[in-house]
Structures are given as C-alpha cells and as structure tokens.
Image (cartoon, rainbow, N blue to C red):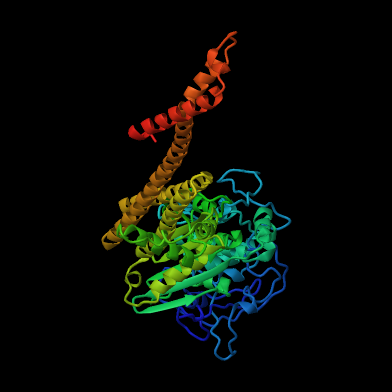
C-alpha cells in the first residue's frame, strides 16, 4: 500500500509537481492558459514552462518560495530523481497560474511592513505574527469583507487599484508598479482589466503559502520562527487517499511542499491528512492551503489540552477531542478477560482472583497503580471538509494506535469506511478512540476485585488509600467520557451527518454509555469497599470492647470482695482465719466459673 505520493513522469494528479521559475520572468497568455491546474477542476493539465532568468535581488518578504533567488522554489531533495527527457515541468501553483515567478511582491526593507491604502484607512499597528495573525486569515468571512471594502463594481469585480489595496491590506506591499503589473498579468489571464473574487482569493492564497515556504520570510516572523525552532521533535506528515476500489498510503511524507501544493487525485473520494506532532509552521501551511479558521488553529496549537468541542465554520467543521490509551494493550486485555470471567463464575467455582495469594495480589496491584494503566489525555484535532480530513495529534501514543487502527480498517476494500465520505471517517476515528476505553474500564474493575480480596485476607493492615487512588482513576475515565458523549450528540444534530452514519454514531454513544455505567458501578464498589473497611474496623473495635467487658464482668466479684476486705475496719473476723486466703480464691474461681457458664447459656460467649 505504501507508494510514493507523487510518482515521477506522469501527467495525472499523481505526478510530481515541480517548477523552474526565475525572478522577473513572464509568460504569454496562451502559456498561462495551458498550465492551468486549478484545485477546483477535476482535470489536470501539464505543460513545459521555459522561463529566462534575470538579475535582481530578492527581498526576504517576497512571496516567492526561494529565499536565495534560486531557479526553483522547491529544493532538489523534495522530489524523486527523474531523467531530463521524461520530466514533466508543471507549475507549483494552487490556482494553476504560475504566480510565483513574478518579481518581489511583498514588503521590502525600504517600504513599510504594511502599506495600507486610503480606501481602507491608515493603520500603523505592527504586524501580529501570532497564531491568529489576520494576514493569514483566509476564511470566507474575512475575504468577502476585504473584497467588498476594496470597492468592487456592480459586477462584483475589482479594479487593479482595488486589487492592489486588497493585497496591501493582507500585508503584501508592492515595491514598484512594474512588479505589480507583472503580477496582475498573471492573475488576470483573460485580460478583462478586472479581478474576480475567485482570482482575488487564489492570488492571496498563493502568495501566503509561498511566504510560508520561504525560510527568509519565516525568519521575519519572530514568534512563529521561535516556535518552530523550539520544537525538539519535528512533526511527521502522513496521508491516506482512498476510494472503494483503490487506496494509497504514504507515511511519512518526505516531499511536504509538493504534497501541500498537490490536489486530491480524481480517483480518490477522501484524502486523510495526518499530522503527528505540533509543528506551528506545518499547521500554518495547512491552514492557508485549506483555509482553516484561526480559532480552530489556535485550539490545535494550544499548549494545554482543550475540552472536547465541535464547531462548524464556513469552510469546514472542527472537532477537538481528548484521547486516552492503555499503557500496555496486552496487559489491560489480560485483566479485562479475568474480570469478565469473574463476573460469570458459578458460586461453587473459584474465580481467577480467588486463587491468588497475598503476595501475588500485591505484585499485580503494583502494576495497576496510577500512571501504569492509561496515558495522560492527549489532544486530537480534526478539520473536516468535503473530501478532505486533517487530523493533528500530539506526538505520542495517539499517533501510532490511531493510525494503525484506522489503516487496518481502510486496508479492507469492502469496509464501510472505504464506501463512504469523510463523515464516516470521522465516525471511524471516534470509534477507534472509544474502543480503547473499555479495556481500561474493566481493568479498573479487576483492580477493585483484587483490592477486595486483599482486604479480606489482611483487613488489619489494609491501606485504605489504595481504594482512593483507584477511585481517582475511575473518575478520570468517567470525566473523559462525558464530553465525548456531548460531542457525538452535537454531531448527530448537525446537518453534516445523515443517513447510515447517524446509526453508527448512535452505536458509539451506546458504547460510551456502557463505559460510563461501568465507571459508576466501579465508584459504587469503591464506596462499598470503604464502607466494608470501616465496618470491619468498627467490628474489630466492638469485639475488643466486648471481650474487655466480659473480662471485667468475670472479675467484678473479685473486685467487690477485694474492696470489702480492704476496708480499714479495726476487726474483720474472716481475716484472722488460718485458711481464709485459700477459701477466698476458691470462692472467686467458683463465681468466675458460674459467670462464664451463664455467658455460655446466654450465648454471649
């Protein structure tokens, strides 16, 4: 299944995307038309582009990909090696026009960072390169508002001056009129003298994405560059593209730039993009490529794990999930089987836990202490679009387990997920996450059974804190399930999920309900064990008090006689009798025996 994502020497959507561009070069209108390869069209065209290099110095904030004025914006290592005779040169361009070959369109050292037009009003505020940088916000609400502020005509078309104002408002300052005119000639390929909204959006999207592949430009964005440099573990990008009769999986993707600029193949119904590790620059590139909402991106890149939520935006819907995973799947599965067997054992038979002695119980309970059963919550962010799903995960257990589980399902050609759209893939991801919770829950049940048996074996030295720790583990699992149930309820109520997919989401809800009920039963058992422990301690105290009371009752006659004969009367006849001492002991023993006999008759002893 693992094949190169972009195979060399092909004219289809699978072909390696490469480009040879130079500063200041231009193309004829016919050439631009021939190289059109829009992501909105289902067909893919290729054409050989021959561009003549000219001299010039590139600005760091240029929209071009190359930071040193090299011939190609793509490093040679980004593509498989192909022969000169067979290599198909295609524009590395989302809209199809070779926008990247024009001279610097961006703020230079001599110009202001943002050259706002009079139409939009002056603003001297410094650029904000945070996660929610407005210059990289390409959402429909932002772009339509910006387009309307640039004074379109009655036909909803922008003049060149309005287009330039829109570029400047997005932080793309033009150094000269010649540069801007060369750029407009590429964008307005039909030479209508106006710019449509689609051309306006595509041009800005092209430039913003090219900026993010320009190392010199990224260095001018201190917070973004610092966040990239601070990531000690680089992110890994993977992709699975599939249809009912075909699947292509690439993990990891080494040619990131070519992949991001590529489109979903015409034969594929779904493209699943998986990002393992939080890399700010990579997520920003994907957000520009697929126009992800800044708030959703901020939730994804936050340092803290967010509460699960579902939000629907204009371009996509966003899900933030928390995932829990067993530390050792083999261990929790073994305890799950033992727990199930103990529930079905007959009264005259022994359960697996009844055969364990104190030493074995202590050893097994040490394996199930806090932190040994399940991982800490990890965040999984999903961006759901028509035909495309992007998942971003922290580098950890989530990545390997989720990716392997879903890949196993997708490898079966007749599986449901292969026959459906991204909505069913969302269900499959959530189902895979929920399926890992049941073994954890039942492992906690097995732990409680072992604690109960240990308390029966050694009630005097039993540590009540163990039950409190187990209760804490169960509560953590229960708190994890409740938000997931709410998320699924919102998905079911959404218009994006209909038909058969709703039935499968209902099955996940039932599964979560079962796990929550198990957690509640475990908590009840914890409370019951605490009550049993307290009752056992109280019974021990009562027994001790009872025994002491019996002893006091037996010796009460002796204490009485001792008090009588110990009084300071001048004459007590019995004390002068020669055998008085022996008679006293004989009487005391007889009285004690009679008292014990009475207790036996009354069944008090």
Q: Residue at x 59, y 89 (%)?
A: 84
Q: Please name whichever residue, 308 or 536, is drawn nearer the observer in this view of the structure.
A: 536
Q: Residue at x 53, y 80 (%)?
A: 16
26 shown above or below 342: below
Asked whether the viewer can see residue 248, the reply is yes
146 shown above or below 33: above
Residue 186: percent from left, percent from top: 54, 68
Quadrant location of the N terminus in the rendered image: bottom left
Q: Residue at x 42, y 65 (%)?
A: 388
Residue furthest bottom in the image: 85
Asked whether the viewer can see residue 39, the reply is no
Q: Please name whichever residue, 575 or 288, is drawn nearer the observer in this view of the structure.
A: 575
Q: Is residue 529 left or right of residue 186?
A: left
Residue 101: percent from left, percent from top: 61, 71
Q: Is residue 466 left or right of residue 222?
A: left
Residue 296: percent from left, percent from top: 49, 52
Task: Determine the image quadrant of residue 43.
Answer: bottom left
Q: Is residue 376 left or right of residue 509?
A: right
191 shown above or below 542: below
Residue 68: percent from left, percent from top: 71, 70
Residue furthest top in the image: 570
Q: Please name whichever residue, 303 or 570, is drawn nearer the observer in this view of the structure.
A: 570
237 shown above or below 16: above
């Amino acid at each position: 299944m693992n094949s190169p994502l972009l195979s060399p020497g092909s004219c289809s959507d699978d072909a390696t995307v490469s480009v040879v561009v130079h500063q200041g070069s231009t193309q004829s209108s016919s050439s631009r038309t021939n190289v059109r390869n829009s992501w909105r069209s289902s067909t893919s065209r290729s054409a050989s582009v021959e561009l003549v290099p000219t001299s010039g110095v590139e600005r760091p904030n240029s929209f071009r990909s190359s930071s040193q004025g090299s011939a190609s914006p793509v490093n040679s290592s980004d593509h498989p090696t192909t022969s000169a005779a067979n290599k198909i040169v295609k524009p590395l361009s989302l809209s199809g026009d070779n926008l990247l070959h024009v001279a610097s369109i961006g703020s230079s050292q001599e110009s202001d960072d943002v050259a706002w037009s009079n139409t939009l009003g002056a603003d001297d505020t410094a650029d904000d390169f945070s996660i929610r940088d407005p210059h990289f916000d390409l959402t429909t609400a932002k772009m339509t508002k910006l387009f309307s502020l640039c004074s379109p005509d009655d036909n909803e078309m922008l003049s060149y001056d309005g287009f330039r104002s829109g570029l400047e408002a997005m932080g793309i300052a033009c150094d000269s009129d010649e540069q801007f005119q060369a750029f407009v000639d590429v964008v307005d390929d039909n030479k209508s003298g106006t710019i449509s909204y689609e051309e306006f959006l595509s041009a800005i999207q092209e430039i913003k994405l090219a900026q993010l592949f320009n190392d010199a430009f990224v260095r001018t964005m201190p917070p973004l560059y610092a966040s990239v440099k601070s990531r000690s573990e680089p992110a890994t990008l993977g992709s699975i593209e599939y249809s009912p009769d075909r699947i292509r999986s690439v993990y990891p993707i080494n040619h990131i730039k070519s992949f991001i600029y590529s489109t979903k193949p015409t034969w594929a119904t779904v493209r699943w993009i998986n990002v393992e590790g939080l890399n700010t620059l990579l997520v920003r590139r994907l957000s520009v490529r697929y126009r992800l909402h800044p708030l959703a991106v901020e939730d994804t890149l936050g340092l803290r794990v967010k509460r699960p939520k579902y939000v629907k935006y204009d371009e996509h819907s966003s899900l933030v999930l928390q995932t829990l995973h067993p530390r050792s799947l083999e261990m929790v599965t073994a305890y799950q089987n033992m727990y199930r067997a103990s529930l079905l054992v007959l009264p005259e038979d022994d359960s697996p836990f009844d055969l364990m002695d104190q030493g074995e119980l202590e050893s097994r309970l040490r394996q199930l202490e806090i932190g040994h059963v399940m991982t800490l919550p990890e965040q999984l962010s999903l961006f759901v679009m028509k035909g495309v799903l992007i998942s971003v995960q922290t580098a950890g257990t989530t990545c390997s387990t989720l990716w392997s589980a879903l890949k196993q399902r997708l490898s079966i050609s007749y599986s449901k997920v292969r026959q459906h759209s991204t909505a069913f893939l969302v269900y499959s991801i959530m189902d895979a996450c929920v399926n890992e919770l049941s073994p954890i829950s039942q492992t906690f049940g097995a732990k409680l059974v072992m604690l109960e048996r240990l308390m029966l074996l050694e009630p005097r030295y039993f540590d009540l804190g163990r039950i409190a720790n187990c209760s804490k583990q169960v509560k953590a699992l229960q708190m994890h399930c409740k938000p997931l149930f709410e998320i699924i309820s919102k998905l079911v109520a959404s218009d994006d999920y209909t038909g058969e997919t709703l039935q499968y989401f209902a099955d996940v809800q039932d599964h979560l309900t079962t796990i929550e009920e198990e957690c509640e039963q475990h908590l009840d058992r914890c409370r019951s064990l605490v009550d049993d422990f307290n009752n056992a301690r109280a019974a021990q105290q009562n027994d001790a008090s009872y025994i002491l009371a019996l002893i006091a009752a037996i010796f009460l006659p002796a204490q009485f006689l001792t008090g009588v004969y110990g009084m300071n009367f001048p004459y007590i006849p019995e004390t002068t009798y020669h055998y008085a001492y022996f008679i006293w002991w004989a009487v005391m023993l007889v009285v004690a025996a009679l008292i014990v006999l009475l207790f036996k008759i009354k069944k008090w002893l």
